[in-house]
Image (cartoon, helix red, strand yellow):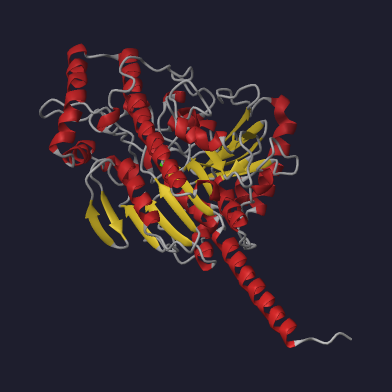
Amino acid sequence: MKKVTPLLLVISVIIILVACDATKKMTAAVEVKRPNIVIIMTDDHAKNAMSLYNNALIQTPNMDRIGKEGITFKNAFVTNSICGPSRSVILTGKYSHINGFRDNGDRFDGSQWTFPKELQKHGYYTAMVGKWHLSTAPTGFDYWNILIDQGQYYNPDFVEMGDTARREGYSTNLITDIAMQTLDQRPKDKPFMMLLYHKAPHRNWMPDTTHLHLYNDKDLPIPFTFYDNYDNRKAAAAQDMEIKDMFLSSDMKLYLPEGAKDTGSGGSGPNSRYNPQRDWESLYGRMNPAQKKAWDDYYKPISDAFYRNNPQGKELEEWMYQRYIKDYLRCIAAVDDNVGRFLDYLERTGELDNTLIIYTSDQGFYLGEHGWYDKRFMYEESFSTPMVMRYPKKIKAGIINNNLVLNLDLASTILDIAGVPVPADVQGESLVPLFNKKNSKDWRKSIYYHYYEYPHGWHSVKRHLGVRTDRYKLIHFYHDINEWELYDLHKDPHEMNNIYNDPVNKEIITNLKQQLKDLVEKYKDTESVSLIK
Ligand code: CA
């Protein structure tokens, strides 16, 4: 046996100590390298208003960059197409009937499990900046700074960890500024998770003064379903969300003649008491003199020309469409600029490639399709949502995925990327297995939808639930109506032709109802079982 000399022993100890130190350093390096996570979310951003999905309306190079350098989900949908419910689904990875936030009249139960809480527990620095809109104060965040309810476009009030203060500027810029300041001041020894939630482009679509002149020289194409007469679709006929009924003051930004009353609608139930002129006066009244001057210089001549020309009928409807769509897109343009600013910030601070960046909206929106604005319906424009992700360590650039994915899946995806186990009762699936795939065979074949905000909500959209597969969509409207609709999305992508009552589709309907029942059971929406007959 070899004898260990004191010198050898000393050398061995030194080697071991050096090795231990190196291991410690490596462990620390691995810790630091845990990915950051950012969700940039807008409010009411239709896929059609993002150039990666549709080139006809606007160029959004910065949002597109996330998808082009990562993955674009072409078939991303929401489970309940309205603001608060969508936000609750994202936080919990659970359907509305489980997380308890079914419609915008509800309050989010902040004591329940959310993915930010789970990340916080696992050593992440968590922050929430921008539009929260869940009635109760945020929980699970080390830092939060949020708008009050819908917030304001100009000089909005923010609540920072409970303290309210008004900030001078335009909301989309301010929210991005706060996000960057928050990251500057974060503890640098932890990975971060940030929810960067914009107010824009929510109604009443007030653009930044720097974007007012976009689209001055051209009109935008009118969707060919603009003059839809809702044949064979009773719920579609019963809604109150047509562009022709928009408010002339707050939506159209007209300067109503002295003593005139607004002629718009778009409210129902308790919202019929809504006073658009009073609301508009308060929003417009928040502007400082410079903002007001830029605003008046742009909108006053438009308003004067409107009252001079007095358009009627079709001419009026199309004028209103142009007013609406241009302001909507101008709000998106500011978001795109700010997505660019934020990506530049991450790049400058060396965090870009170590961050999973998700860009999405809380749901889609109607941009004149069926003559509408707003959301709620399970029809494609509001059921779908833009969803792109960038994380070069796991996602190859330029992947376009066609699987049916949901906002429900974000919580599981984020935990998966962070290396945190997903609790068994979370209902979404991790999208990580789809990251480098165009169309995975090993994925869900149908998705479930359920909307509740009737009769007490805005726009008179009946309660409904439904199922969508790659090809078909079956919807059941209930409560004070009992209607079924079936669409063949391959033949009728714009859902103008309800083929539910065509006997030739009997077998398809039986099959879809079975899938709907299976989903209701899978997601434990037990109170809805009896609705499917
Ligand atoms: Ca929304």
Residue 154 visible within the image: yes
Picture quarter containing residue 248?
Answer: top left
Relative placement, left or right, of 324 versus 515 is left
Farthest-out residue, left: 258
Q: How far across and how far down the image is residue 466, in percent?
A: 59, 40
Horizontal side of 92 relative to 532 (left or right) equals left
**Residue shown at the point (18%, 42%) measured from the top left:** 286
Please provide percent x and percent y for residue 509.
Answer: 69, 34
In this rendered view, identify the residue nearer to me: 137 or 531.
Answer: 137
Residue closer to the observer: 346 or 268? 346
Taking the image as drawn, is residue 42 in sight? no
**Quadrant housing the C terminus:** top right
Q: Residue at x 23, y 55 (%)?
A: 165
Q: Nearer the viewer, residue 189 or 320?
A: 189
Q: Residue drawn at (57%, 58%), measured in percent from left and top?
A: 34
The N terminus - image quarter: bottom right
Q: Residue at x 62, y 31 (%)?
A: 486
Vertical order, 121 against 399 (above or below): below
Q: Position of residue 170 (x, y in %)?
A: 27, 40
| Location of residue 130 in the rendering, given as x and y in whole percent from the top left corner | 36, 49
Name the side, left or right, on which 167 lies relative to 85: left
